[in-house]
Image (cartoon, rainbow, N blue to C red):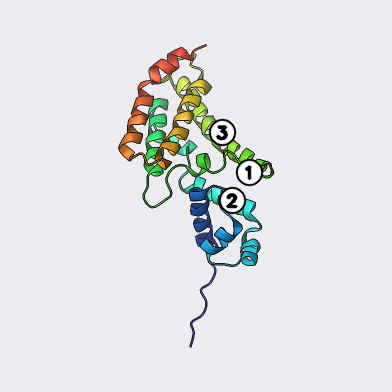
Amino acid sequence: MAGRPRQFDRNEALDKAMRLFWERGYEGTSVGDLAQALGINKPSLYAAFGCKENLFYEALDLYERTYGCVSPDELDAFATAREAIAGALHRNAETAVDPTTPRGCFIVLSAAVGPPQDEKVRAHLTQRRLSSLEHFTRRIKRGIADGDVPAGTYARAVASFYTTVINGIAIQARDGAPRAVLDGIVDGAMAAWDTLCARSRH
């Protein structure tokens, strides 16, 4: 007698979709690819997630909850702004080369370019990437208030530099850079902290 068919696990399916989008990007992942990876047919996929775009947004939410580029809580756990930025960068370097997941950052790599009809998705990803800038800016401003960042430092300019480093880590990791190289990039970037704070002062 045949066993009962396995019940559909939406959370498990969403995790598989996240990893597929992470590996191939939005444009490189078709509905057929998703249905095959999730082990369901296309009508079932639409019934569970609505459409490819909605599934992509849900996958992004799962990524941010599970891995994320920059977490405000993570930044606030450090005593100083410099330690917070360094900690976030090193954690991103670690996540970017985790052998259990695709390399790089899902949000950074997913859809920088594409056809006009997917402009909404690209704009959404832009806002997600800008959230890292906002989180870094807020933490540096807190550092100014706490006295561990020099008064007059232009927080957004310093945050922009370190956000660019995060984006670069994602690309280096996808290109095969090992963890030691990524950590070296972070250490080099953090060595510029005092200079950046001094040069960005109003």
Of residue 73 and residue 112, the one placed in the foreground of this image is: 112
Residue type for callout 2: Phe
Which of 62 and 170 lies nearest the eye of the viewer?
170
The answer to the question of whether label 1 and label 3 lie on touching residues, with beta carbons closer than 8 A, is no
Horizontal side, residue 19 vs residue 115: left or right: left
Residue 130, label in figure: 3
What is the x, y in percent for residue 105?
Answer: 47, 42
Local crowd size for mark 2, using a 10 Å CA cut-off: few (<14), some (14–19), many (≥20): many
Q: Identity of the amino acid at label 1?
A: Val
Disc 2 + disc 1, Cβ < 8 Å = yes
Quadrant in the rendering for residue 45 = bottom right
Rendered position, 62 above or below 71: below
User: Which corner quadrant of the image does residue 169 belong to?
Assistant: top left
CB under 8 Å between discs 2 and 3: no
Q: Sequence order check: which comes first, mark 1 or mark 3?
A: 1
Distance from the alpha carbon under mark 1 to that under mark 3: 14 Å
Judged by depth in the image, the label closer to the viewer, 1 or 3, is: 1
Residue 50 in the image: x percent, y percent?
Answer: 66, 58
Which residue is depicted at the point 45% across and 33% down? 168
Which residue was labeled with disc 1?
121
Q: Residue at x 37, y 36 (%)?
A: 90
**Sequence-wise first label, 2 or 3:** 2
> In this orientation, does residue 44 appear?
yes
Give the vertical position of 155 relative to 77 (above or below): above
Q: Is residue 76 visible?
A: no
Taking the view exactly as shown, the residue that stands out farthest to the left is 180
Toward the top, the furthest residue is 202
The residue identified by callout 2 is 56
